[in-house]
């Protein structure tokens, strides 16, 4: 899976959104498969993130809500 090429993903999202979402799904599936001991938790987390994004109404609101989820988890760790 190598390094993350932001420019590649940005270009794909801008020029072929359907291909972007297919590639994103494949990438996430591969990442989760590389962590079999945590696969269930990672898949659940990704499903939660995807649902949050779908229900947010806008990319900005989705970002706010996901950052809120991250803050909640950081507070639990503290």
Image (spheres, rainbow, N blue to C red):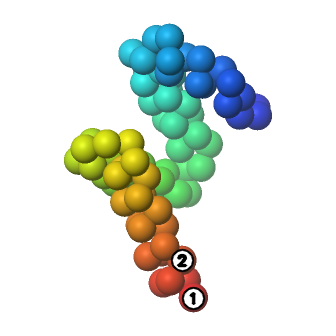
The residue shown at (31%, 42%) is: 58
Picture layout, residue 9 above or below residue 37: above
Q: Which residue is mark 2?
A: 74
Residue 29: x, y in percent?
49, 35
Left or right: 63 as drawn, with respect to 35: left
Picture layout, residue 6 above or below residue 63: above
The residue shown at (50%, 11%) is: 15
In the depicted view, which residue is nearer to us: 31 or 78? 78
**Is the Cβ of the residue at disc 1 closer than 8 Å to that at disc 2?**
yes
Dot 2: element:
helix
Q: Dot 2: within a 10 Å radius of its alpha carbon, few (fewer than 14), some, or many (20 or more) residues? A: few
Q: Disc 1 and disc 2: Cα gap in Å?
A: 6 Å
**If the image is split into quadrants, where does the C terminus sit?**
bottom right
Picture layout, residue 37 above or below residue 72: above
Residue 77: x, y in percent?
55, 83
Dot 1: element:
loop
Q: Which residue is mark 1?
A: 78
Q: Dot 1: within a 10 Å radius of its alpha carbon, few (fewer than 14), some, or many (20 or more) residues? A: few
Quadrant location of residue 9? top right
């Amino acid at each position: 899976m190598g390094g993350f090429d932001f420019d590649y993903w940005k270009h794909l999202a801008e020029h072929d959104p359907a291909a972007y979402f297919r590639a994103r799904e494949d990438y996430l599936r591969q990442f989760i498969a590389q962590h079999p001991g945590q696969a269930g938790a990672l898949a659940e987390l990704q499903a939660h993130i995807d649902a949050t994004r779908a229900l947010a109404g806008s990319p900005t609101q989705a970002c706010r809500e996901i950052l809120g989820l991250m803050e909640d988890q950081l507070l639990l760790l503290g």
